[in-house]
Image: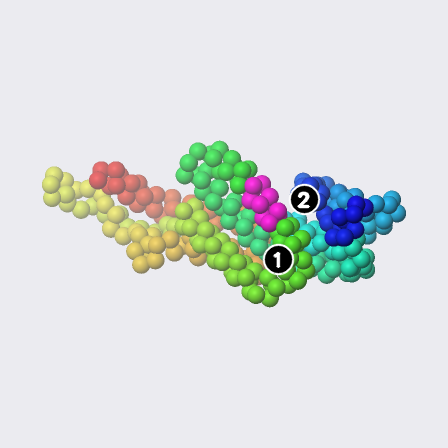
């Protein structure tokens, strides 16, 4: 230890912090197993910090040993745990903390960071990004959506993880507690959920198709030519769209959501039901002559 370190105390170097972050960011899922979950990855992430803070082999071995124990979280939001523990290890190296406190804090962080990460990142942000990219593939080139996702997802993940890592290190456990107590996290979660609902609603209106196969076609006199022409006298779907556009796709989406969340249907069962409904409605469409209604409407639209 140098004279400056003796007077000011141990301090983790910026290089060690960055190596710790990159170790976690790239390798957090590589050693996941049933015994310690993400414990081995956490230990690997802490290795540069431990090497920077402790001098003897015994101190480093003890520090690594306490960081390969059971640990689990959502990897992106969970990077705040790494930052907090780095700060605690720094305090421990300066005699202001104990290994028991570090282990207790790690265990205490598992629940909230997992819940917040799964609901905010996995359950909200990623589905919104996927929805936007699928829409890009439909309205633009088919390859554009995957390319946008492959760029935005890793970059966004890296920025989020690094900012949370820094927040954890600089603010410590108190910073995380104050952020949660201030309600900022709740407001962010609510905003992301509302944004997700808006995107899902737009996707439903744009991509979900459902029609009632009932309409009436009749012949009317064309005043310009004096000939009888076929025209659509009544179309159930136009009437419904007249007072509530895209009502049937919305009801179908709500019905599928109800089956999935309340009745606990599996995705395969839901896909099978949709296939059966589609086949049944298509058969009714041709048996009742509704296909002629659509053909007449298409011809009229083309002539106009």
Magenta stretch, main secondary structure class: helix
Mark 2 and mark 1 lie on one chain; the one further toward the N terminus is: 2
Spot occupied by residue 98 in the image (x, y as percentages of width and height) = 81, 59
Q: Is residue 106 left or right of residue 184?
A: right
Which residue sits at x=85%, y=49%? 59
Q: Which residues are magenta?
A: 153-163
Q: How is the image coloured?
A: rainbow
Which residue sits at x=74%, y=53%? 8
Q: Is residue 203 left or right of residue 7?
A: left
Work out which residue is located at the far bottom of the displayed protein and give it: 181
Mark identifier at residue 116: 1
Where disc 1 sits, the SS reads helix
The answer, for residue 250, to whether it is visible in the render is yes
Query: Which of the 4 image quadrants contains residue 177?
Result: bottom right
Depth check: give the residue in front, 200 or 125. Answer: 125
Residue denoted by label 2: 14
Spot occupied by residue 203 in the image (x, y as percentages of width and height) = 44, 48
Depth check: give the residue in front, 197 or 268. Answer: 197
Mark identifier at residue 41: none
Which residue sits at x=45%, y=42%? 135
């Amino acid at each position: 230890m140098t004279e400056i370190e003796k007077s000011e105390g141990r301090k983790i170097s910026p290089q060690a912090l960055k190596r710790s972050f990159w170790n976690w960011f790239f390798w957090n899922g590589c050693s996941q197993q049933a015994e310690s979950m993400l414990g081995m990855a956490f230990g690997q992430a802490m290795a540069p910090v431990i090497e920077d803070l402790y001098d003897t082999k015994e101190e480093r071995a003890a520090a690594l040993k306490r960081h390969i124990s059971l640990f689990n979280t959502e990897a992106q939001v969970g990077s705040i745990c790494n930052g907090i523990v780095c700060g605690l290890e720094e305090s421990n190296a300066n005699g202001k903390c104990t290994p028991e406190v570090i282990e207790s804090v790690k265990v205490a962080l598992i629940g909230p960071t997992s819940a917040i990460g799964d609901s905010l990142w996995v359950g909200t942000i990623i589905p919104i990004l996927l929805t936007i990219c699928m829409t890009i593939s439909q309205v633009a080139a088919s390859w554009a959506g995957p390319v946008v996702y492959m760029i935005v997802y890793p970059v966004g993940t890296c920025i989020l993880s690094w900012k949370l890592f820094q927040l954890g290190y600089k603010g410590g456990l108190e910073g995380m507690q104050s952020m949660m107590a201030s309600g900022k996290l709740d407001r962010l979660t609510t905003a992301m959920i509302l944004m997700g609902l808006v995107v899902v609603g737009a996707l439903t209106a744009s991509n979900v198709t459902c029609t009632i196969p009932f309409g009436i076609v009749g012949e009317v006199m064309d005043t310009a030519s004096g000939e009888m022409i076929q025209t659509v006298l009544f179309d159930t779907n136009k009437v419904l769209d007249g007072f509530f556009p895209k009502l049937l796709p919305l009801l179908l989406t709500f019905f599928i959501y109800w089956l999935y969340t309340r009745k606990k249907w599996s995705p395969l069962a839901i896909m099978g039901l949709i296939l059966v409904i589609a086949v049944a409605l298509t058969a009714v469409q041709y048996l009742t002559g509704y296909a002629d209604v659509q053909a007449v409407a298409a011809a009229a639209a083309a002539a106009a």
